[in-house]
Image (cartoon, rainbow, N blue to C red):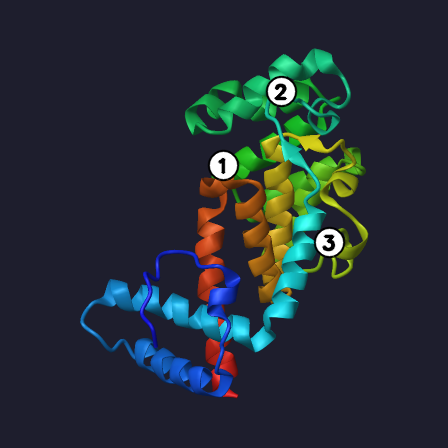
């Protein structure tokens, strides 16, 4: 097998076999060796394992299916990010709240700043802003309050704001994270909706909205074991929103680990 710098992301075509039977056999053998922790350089072996796993994974599905999934996901994300825009999902359609919303959004990057704002007090003070109820829930999660308390708060918020899409997406995220099924995100979502129609917004959204949607999609695809579509999600994220790569770097790592686990299953068959 030709050696590569495994840390570099290659074009998808470079993973596809030209001599399928021969190359698959070689990859399976090397995969088994790497899983058995052979080799002196563990870091290099781990990187190579990810590369070999990708080859086995992508060739299991074939180039046409991979590209179809990626095209579907690229088309789904029909939005652009502009954090100078405060959408109606954040300000409830009242631009007078934009300064407050912007302050809260900026605080989300620093737990001390967020704590000073007192999200619980803010949510009570501005009941007309569902966004603040969501921030209160996010703050509770950051502070690691009991899950039952957080879920109760989320359900209460949804009973007050049943149509708020960001609260609904957060609910989807928590359900799928706990291996339960939601109601918004499903198999046909990517074929019949786009990010803008799901969010009910224009084509320009705030990065906070993107992250709410991204989290919900990610947890759904993991829960459903849709690893190929998860790969497509990460590809679309990197392609369309490269400036936000750090925001989902952990998700990308986990998606690669899932490829390794998938290969263990198909090789075991």
Q: Would you say residue 255 is visible in this rendering?
A: yes
Tag nearer the camera, 1 or 3:
1
Quarter of the image where one finds residue 246: top left
Ranked by sequence position, the earlier of labels 1 and 2 is 2
At a point 78% along the width and 56% down the height, the residue shown is: 191
At a point 81% along the width and 37% down the height, the residue shown is: 163
x and y percentages locating residue 96 in the rendered image: 71, 11
Q: How many marks?
A: 3
| Label 2 secondary element | helix
* 222 displayed left or right of 89: left
* Above or below 204: residue 102: above
Ranked by sequence position, the earlier of labels 1 and 3 is 3
What's the CA distance linking mark 1 and mark 2? 22 Å
Residue for badge 3: 185
What's the CA distance linking mark 1 and mark 3? 26 Å
Ranked by sequence position, the earlier of labels 2 and 3 is 2
* 69 displayed left or right of 139: right
What's the CA distance linking mark 2 and mark 3? 27 Å
| Label 3 secondary element | loop
x and y percentages locating residue 196 in the rendered image: 75, 39
| Label 1 secondary element | helix
Residue for badge 1: 243
Residue for badge 2: 101
């Amino acid at each position: 097998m030709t050696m590569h710098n495994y840390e570099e992301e290659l074009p998808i075509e470079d993973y596809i076999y030209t001599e399928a039977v021969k190359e698959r056999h070689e990859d399976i053998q090397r995969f088994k060796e790497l899983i058995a922790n052979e080799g002196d350089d563990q870091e290099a072996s781990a990187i190579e394992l990810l590369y070999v796993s990708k080859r086995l994974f992508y060739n299991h599905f074939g180039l046409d299916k991979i590209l179809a999934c990626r095209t579907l996901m690229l088309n789904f994300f029909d939005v652009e990010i502009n954090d100078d825009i405060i959408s109606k999902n954040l300000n409830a359609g009242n631009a007078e709240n934009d300064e407050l919303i912007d302050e809260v959004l900026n605080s989300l990057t620093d737990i001390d700043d967020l704590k000073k704002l007192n999200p619980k007090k803010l949510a009570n003070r501005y009941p007309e802003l569902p966004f603040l109820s969501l921030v209160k829930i996010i703050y509770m999660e950051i502070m690691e309050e009991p899950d039952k308390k957080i879920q109760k708060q989320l359900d209460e918020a949804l009973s007050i704001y049943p149509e708020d899409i960001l609260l609904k997406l957060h609910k989807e995220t928590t359900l799928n994270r706990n291996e339960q099924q939601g109601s918004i995100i499903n198999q046909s979502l990517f074929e019949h909706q786009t990010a803008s129609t799901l969010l009910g917004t224009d084509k320009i959204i705030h990065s906070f909205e993107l992250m709410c949607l991204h989290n919900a999609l990610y947890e759904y695809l993991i829960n459903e074991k849709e690893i190929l579509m998860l790969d497509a999600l990460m590809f679309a994220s990197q392609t369309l929103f490269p400036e936000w790569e750090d925001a989902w770097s952990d998700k990308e790592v986990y998606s690669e680990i899932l490829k390794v686990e998938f290969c263990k299953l198909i090789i075991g068959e």
